[in-house]
Image (cartoon, rainbow, N blue to C red):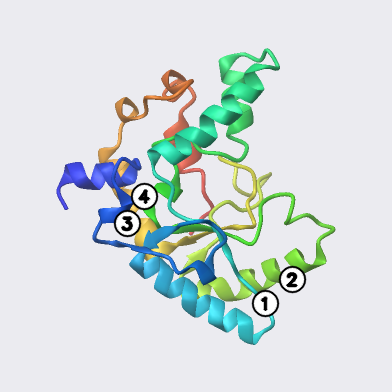
Amino acid sequence: MTNSEIKDLLIGKFKVEIHPDFVLVDKKYHDKSEMYLQKQTLESFIKMREAAEKDGIQLTIISGTRDFYSQKSIWERKYNNYKKEELSEVEIIKKIMLWSSMPTTSRHHWGTDIDINGFDDYFSEENKKANKEYKWLLINAPKFDFCQVYTEKGEGKRRTGYNEEKWHWSYMPLACKYLNLYQEIVTYEDISGFSGSHFAKEMDIINKYVFGISDI
């Protein structure tokens, strides 16, 4: 790929349906009408899913690749909802980014990251099923090159970025490469085209969120 094509992938501005590295995910592995992932990501997930089944654990992908426009749809919906609370633009952005990425900055653009089984409501302390699934993933996901990049935050732990996401797992052989490329070729000029995008540089979004991940 050319540098331009690589950048388009990193910021989600490409057609996943025709990209040679992406494949359509069989419906039995996810709960959406349609989903795409990088071929390597999917192959490793299938192996992990089969191993989990042997231990009585069911793993289903609930979010895979999201292009710029899919991420923008999520962003604008949340932005408009919070706007009704009469918050400032920066306050709105901070609330959205407890859980959701700015378009052009999401790891879900890359086809390397998946959300499994549920989100924050599902992975609550009260949900024993979810707790069992999470414990299985903590022990076994690394065997298949998946890592929980958004771990717990706090003193002596991860200091910046999104809240802890027990459901979000990243296929590291590809994701590490893309993160390094992101640092090299994506700039704040590329982060545009959605509400509040002009605050990205002021809020140091690349350093605090794109790179606000657990030590790997």
Residue nearest the observer in this picture, 84 or 183: 84
Real-space CA distance between mark 1 and mark 2, rounded to the nearest whole angstrom? 8 Å
Q: Which mark is residue 177?
A: 3
Q: Which class describes the residues within 10 Å of circle 4: few (<14), some (14-19), or many (20+)?
A: some
Q: CA distance from mark 4 to mark 2?
A: 30 Å
Look at 39% across and 56% down and name the residue there.
111
Three-letter code for the amino acid on which mark 2 is drawn: Lys
Give how far across and how far down residue 148 sits, in percent.
56, 59
Disc 4 versus disc 2: nearer the observer: 2
The residues tagged by marks 3 and 4 sit, at their Cα atoms, a distance apart of 5 Å
Mark-to-mark CA distance, 2 and 3? 31 Å
Residue position marked by numbered label 2 in the rendering? 132
- Of labels 3 and 1, the one closer to you: 1
User: In this view of the protein, can residue 47 be seen by the observer?
Assistant: yes
Q: Which mark is residue 171?
A: none
Seen at 58% across and 76% down, the residue is 140
Q: Are marks 1 and 2 in contact (CB under 8 Å)?
A: yes
Left or right of 65 in this view: 124: right
Query: In front: mark 2 or mark 3?
Result: 2
- Dot 3 surroundings within 10 Å: few (below 14), some, or many (20 or more)? few
SS at mark 4 in the image: helix
